[in-house]
Image (tube, helix red, strand yellow):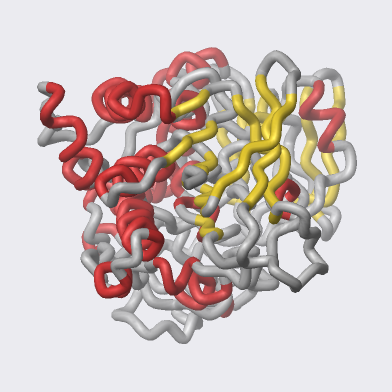
Amino acid sequence: MEPVVVIGAGPQGLAAAAHLLERGLEPLVLESGDGPASAVAEWGHVRLFSQWSELVDAASRRLLEPTGWAAPETGYPTGAEWVEGYLAPLAAALGGRVRYGAQVTGVGRKGRDLSVDAGRAEQPFVVHVRSSDGSEERLEAWAVIDASGTWRSPSPLGADGLPALGEGAAAAAGLLDHRTPTAEDAAGLAGGHVVVVGSGSSATTAVGLLARVVKDDPSTRVTWVLRRGVVGNAFGGGDADELPERGALGQRAKKAVEDGLVDLVTGFRTERVEVEDGRAVLVAEDGRRLAAADRAVVATGFRPDLSFLSEVRLDLDVRLQAPAKVSAEVDPNVHSCGSVRATGAADLAHPEPGFYIVGAKSYGRAPTFLALTGFEQVRSVAAELAGDHEAAARVDLVLPDTGVCGGSGLFDAPEEGSSGGCCSPTPQLVQLGTRSAG
């Protein structure tokens, strides 16, 4: 029988392989990078807000323990520590079932393009792969699990979802960065002006890091830009967040604003980027201009790369580009509760039998994904592929509450508390008005 092809050797892809092996199925993991969890390695300096016990998959643990590996039990690792302490040993335990430098360029059905119904489900999948040496091949698989993530598909700076005018030129000049800065990066910006755009964890991480630079060198200026007209849930849930470090992350950013270390600009939707004297000037749709910046950290989220899935029949939500049943749980336009239900094979299935999108990519453009979510997803999908429908339907996980309410009402609402959320009231936040840059 052909293998189950798993796209991506990140946390969920490797865990999927471990679950498949445990179920007696043969996985083949295709990783475009030159090592395990290559995307995680790129943000290796960032500390996770999940602790070790929430970052190790159960089947992976069972695979590793006979090798003498012991799971770290306490603390919050950085991405690099996660790779070194768990993901790299897991990939080594999987051995030749993981191939590096193997970029998937297309997935389809053998002898059937997207439009053909006849005999489609009986045909194996074909997976087109380009190796790092430029050679190409076509592999056959009886099922495909796409765990490729979203890291290499960052959303642009432009508020309309398209690159802002001039964004490409500014990026080429090294003035825009989609990465969370390292401590060394931040220190190198001392005395300059840094703009952070975004409202998620990456943005609050960057804001907290840069606030420390301002403390050491008050001549440094940091401007934090939110597209929404109010602060909303940008500061997170604080003490109400069931992941304490996630709550603390937002509260540190809030304190940086309250202490005057960071200037907050709300309702700023970038239309264009101008390069002036080697610095970037962000201009909003309403004509406001920020002071010229030495660097702009673009933490506007990520989106799924669907380009290599054009011949696969997908059922995706039109807003989030996530599997339709998953989107109902995570869509910030309609989902206002802080808790999210765990999702399994039934939620992740598509009209193409045997094809599943798991991990961060299964959330599309939504920003709330946790490693725990992915581990539960791949457990359920492996059970379904092995024919254990009862185990696939079982939910073995309750996800931690964020402690905040979202909802579309916060995007342009004139007052806080207008989200119409279904959970407990959002923690009281400081209302900071829109300001122009000087």
Is 367 rendered above or below residue 80?
below
Tell me if I can see residue 18 in this picture: yes
- The percent position of residue 104, horizontal first and vertical second, equals 65, 37
Q: Residue at x 33, y 32 (%)?
A: 47
Q: Is residue 62 left or right of residue 80?
A: left
- The percent position of residue 13, horizontal first and vertical second, equals 43, 42
Is 253 rendered above or below residue 185?
below
Which of the 4 quarters of the picture holds residue 404?
bottom left
Front position in the image: 6 or 119: 119
Is 383 rendered above or below residue 222?
below
So how many labels did they put on this image?
Answer: 0
Q: Is residue 62 left or right of residue 32?
A: left
Q: Residue at x 48, y 64 (%)?
A: 431
- The percent position of residue 318, horizontal first and vertical second, equals 69, 72
Quadrant that contains the C terminus: top right
Front position in the image: 69 or 253: 69
Which of the 4 quarters of the picture holds residue 336?
bottom left
Q: Residue at x 75, y 72 (%)?
A: 118
Front position in the image: 418 or 102: 102
- The percent position of residue 271, horizontal first and vertical second, equals 83, 51
Tell me if I can see residue 214 in this picture: no
Q: Residue at x 70, y 69 (%)?
A: 119
